[in-house]
Amino acid sequence: MAVMAADVYLLLRSTLGLWQSYDTPKPDPSVIVDDSQCAFSATVPDSLCMLFIWFPFLLVVERLYASQNYQNYENNGAPIIFKVLCGVMWIPMIAEILAFSFSLTLPTNLQACQYSLLSQSNIQRNAWFVIIAVFSAVFSLLFKLLELKNKRIENHSVHNDYVFSCRYQLRENIRTCRFAFSLLLLYFIFFFVFFVFDRNYEDKDELRMIAAARREYLFLIFPMFSLIYSFHFLTANNSLFETAKKALHLYYHEEHGVCFHTSKSHIV
């Protein structure tokens, strides 16, 4: 459900970005745009930046718990607090979407928002990129250490006749840590490239239009790339794809079942 929710959010950002780029009036570079008119104007919104830190942190803690309790993790599972925190971490993004949905004005042209951003210093524009890149590097290192730890335990289990459920959980820990390591390494490269790319912008007045146009393309690249990546992530894993289909199927039948029951009661 989280991946599907991210798909809907990224589709909204991509559509809004295209509208801001091509269907809104062209801006006057001398006019300063208020921040309230620049909804979703950041290359990566703050609410999503928080997810890039919060979710890997939860996953590190959960895999650490699974590595320490591999003998009974399959039966007991993770504590309920992990599920609660996974739900809580989506609140900032939902709040941002609701705030935009209930706003009375449409966002201004994207290029005008970029003129405003270019008046800030390089580190002001890219503080989140630097923070996420650092945390991604740290978390990827932690996942690699957890992977090596589980491999050592697995090798030990082969010679000591561990039960099948323990070995299965160890293999699951290794696969999850390996996937998270590669994903966070991709995050690190992705946000570091964003920071380096933005450092090449010229702050001179005559080049602001060129710089703003380059930021427009960067704004659209992120949600579109992430949308394709999340779709691929959802469809490449058969079990995850089947789970998503079952969730949508269950939601569809619940909605139509309620509608059918309501209409039937009215008829009676």
Image: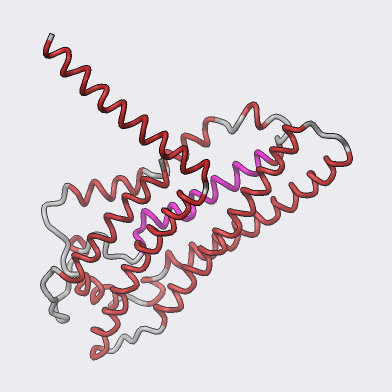
Residue 174: image x %, image y %?
A: 68, 48
Please tell me in which quadrant of the rendered image residue 226 appears: bottom left
Does residue 44 sit above or below 172 in this rendering? below
Magenta stretch encompasses residue 62 = yes
- Name the residue nearer the viewer: 161 or 104: 161
* Quadrant of the snapshot with the C terminus: top left
Does residue 2 sit above or below 211 in this rendering? above
- Name the residue nearer the viewer: 126 or 265: 265
Q: Could you tell whether 162 is left or right of 71 in the image?
A: right
- Name the residue nearer the viewer: 28 or 174: 174
Residue located 19% across and 66% down the image: 20
How many marks overall?
0
Residue 182: image x %, image y %?
A: 59, 60
Q: Which residues are magenta?
A: 44-66
Residue located 82% across and 34% down the image: 162
* Quadrant of the snapshot with the N terminus: top left
Residue located 43% across and 40% down the image: 244
Residue 42: image x %, image y %?
A: 31, 65
Does residue 259 sit above or below 144 in this rendering? above
Magenta stretch encompasses residue 51 = yes
Residue located 61% across and 31% down the image: 77
